[in-house]
C-alpha cells in the first residue's frame, strides 16, 4: 500500500529538518540575545516551514487509515503539537517585524555613531590648530594624522594651511558618508522585501497547520473517541511482531498474524460471553 511509504517519507523529512535546526541552534542560544541572531533563527524557521507542512501532510495522509502500531505514540504527539506550532508561527509575525525594525535602527545608529566620531575628531583638530600662528606649527600638527589627504607648501601662510586643512577634513567627511551609505545599503538591501515574504510564509504555514488540526479534530469528533483512543484504534501490527515475518501464519502460534487489525474502540460487549458470541 502506497500510503505507508508516504507516511514514512513524512516522518523522515520531519526528523531531518528538526535535527538540522537542533544542531544549528542548540549550542547557539546566545544568538537569541542579538537582533541578527534572532533574524537568523526566524529565517531558518521560515525556510523549514514548507518542509514542515509537507511532512505533516504526509504523516496525516488518509487520516487514521492503515496505521502501524509503531505510529501510535508519534502521531498522537504530532497531533498535540499542531496547536503550539500554529501559535508559534503566528508569533513569528510580530517578532520578525520587531527585529526588522530593530535591525534597521541598529544599522542607522552605528552609521550615525561613526559619523559623529569623525566630526568630533574634526572639531578637536581644528580647535587644536586655531591658536597656532606659524605655518610650521600647523604643518607639524597635520603631519601627526597621515590619513588626512593634504599637501603643504612652504610658501603658504598659517591661515592658508588652516583653510586647506578644513577643506581636506570636509572632503574626508564626504567620502566617509559615501562609504557609510554603501554599507547601509548592503546591510539593509531587501530587508523590507524579505520580511514581507517571511510574514506571508509564516501566515500560510499557520493556516496549513490549522487546517490539519481541524481535519484531525473533525475525524476524532465523528469517531466519538478521545484523541488517544482515536489514534489507537484500527492499528496494523508491525511486520516485526512475533509471527509476522514467517509468511505462513500458524493460528496455534502465540505470535500475532501480519497486519492484524487491533481494534481498541469502546464496545458494550458482555465480558462473560465467549469471543465468538461477543462479535
Image (tube, grey):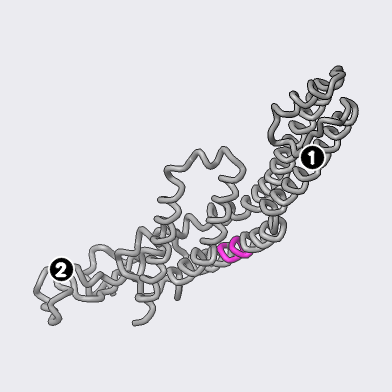
SS category of the residue bearing label 2: loop
Report if residue 208 lies within the magenta region: yes
Q: Residues within 10 Å of mark 2 (few under 14, many from 20)?
A: some
Q: Give the range drawn in magenta.
A: 204-209
Q: Position of residue 269 (x, y in %)?
A: 31, 67
Where residue 197 is drawn, which disc sits there?
none
Residue 36 vs 253, above or below: the answer is above
**Residue under the image location 73 percent in, 40 percent down:** 111
**Residue under the image location 54 percent in, 66 percent down:** 50
Total marks shown come to 2
On screen, residue 107 versus residue 81, left or right, reads: right
Most extreme residue toward the front is: 155
Q: Position of residue 230 (x, y in %)?
A: 41, 64
Q: Position of residue 154 (x, y in %)?
A: 81, 30
**Residue under the image location 57 percent in, 59 percent down:** 46
On screen, residue 159 versus residue 86, left or right, reads: right
Quadrant in which the N terminus is drawn: bottom left
Q: Which of marks 2 and 1 is nearer the N terminus?
A: 1
Q: Residues within 10 Å of mark 1 (few under 14, many from 20)?
A: some
Residue 273 vs 185, above or below: the answer is below
- Residue at the disc numbered 2: 242
Q: Which of 40 and 269 is in front in this view?
A: 40
Prevailing secondary structure class for the magenta stretch in the rendered image: helix
Mark 2 or 1: in front is 1
Q: How far apart are marks 2 and 1 (CA)?
A: 81 Å
**Residue under the image location 44 percent in, 60 percent down:** 17
Q: Position of residue 216 (x, y in %)?
A: 50, 66
Quadrant in which the C terminus is drawn: bottom left
- Residue at the disc numbered 1: 173
Q: In which quarter of the image is residue 7?
A: bottom left
Residue 127 vs 106, above or below: the answer is above
Q: Nearer the viewer, residue 274 or 200?
A: 200
Amino acid at each position: 500500500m502506497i500510503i505507508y511509504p508516504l507516511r514514512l517519507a513524512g516522518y523522515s523529512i520531519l526528523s531531518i529538518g528538526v535535527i538540522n535546526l537542533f544542531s544549528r541552534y542548540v549550542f547557539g542560544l546566545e544568538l537569541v540575545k542579538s537582533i541578527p541572531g534572532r533574524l537568523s533563527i526566524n529565517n531558518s524557521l521560515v525556510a523549514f516551514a514548507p518542509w514542515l507542512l509537507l511532512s505533516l501532510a504526509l504523516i496525516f495522509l488518509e487520516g487514521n487509515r492503515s496505521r502501524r502500531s509503531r505510529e501510535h505514540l508519534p502521531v498522537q504527539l504530532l497531533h498535540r503539537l499542531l496547536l503550539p506550532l500554529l501559535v508559534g508561527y503566528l508569533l513569528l509575525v510580530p517578532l520578525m517585524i520587531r527585529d526588522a525594525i530593530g535591525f534597521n535602527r541598529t544599522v542607522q545608529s552605528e552609521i550615525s555613531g561613526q559619523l559623529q566620531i569623525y566630526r568630533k575628531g574634526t572639531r578637536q583638530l581644528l580647535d587644536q590648530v586655531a591658536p597656532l600662528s606659524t605655518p610650521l606649527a600647523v604643518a607639524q600638527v597635520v603631519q601627526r594624522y597621515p590619513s588626512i589627504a593634504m599637501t603643504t607648501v612652504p610658501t603658504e601662510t598659517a591661515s592658508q594651511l588652516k583653510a586647506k586643512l578644513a577643506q581636506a577634513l570636509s572632503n574626508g567627511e564626504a567620502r566617509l558618508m559615501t562609504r557609510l551609505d554603501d554599507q547601509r545599503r548592503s546591510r539593509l538591501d531587501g530587508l523590507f522585501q524579505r520580511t514581507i515574504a517571511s510574514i506571508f510564509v509564516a501566515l500560510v504555514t499557520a493556516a496549513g497547520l490549522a487546517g490539519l488540526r481541524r481535519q484531525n479534530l473533525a475525524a476524532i469528533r465523528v469517531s466519538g473517541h478521545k484523541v488517544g483512543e482515536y489514534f489507537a484504534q484500527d492499528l496494523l501490527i508491525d511486520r516485526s511482531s512475533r509471527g509476522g515475518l514467517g509468511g505462513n501464519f500458524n493460528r496455534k502460534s502465540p505470535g500475532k498474524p501480519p497486519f492484524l487489525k487491533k481494534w481498541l474502540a469502546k464496545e458494550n460487549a458482555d465480558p462473560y460471553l465467549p469471543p465468538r458470541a461477543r462479535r
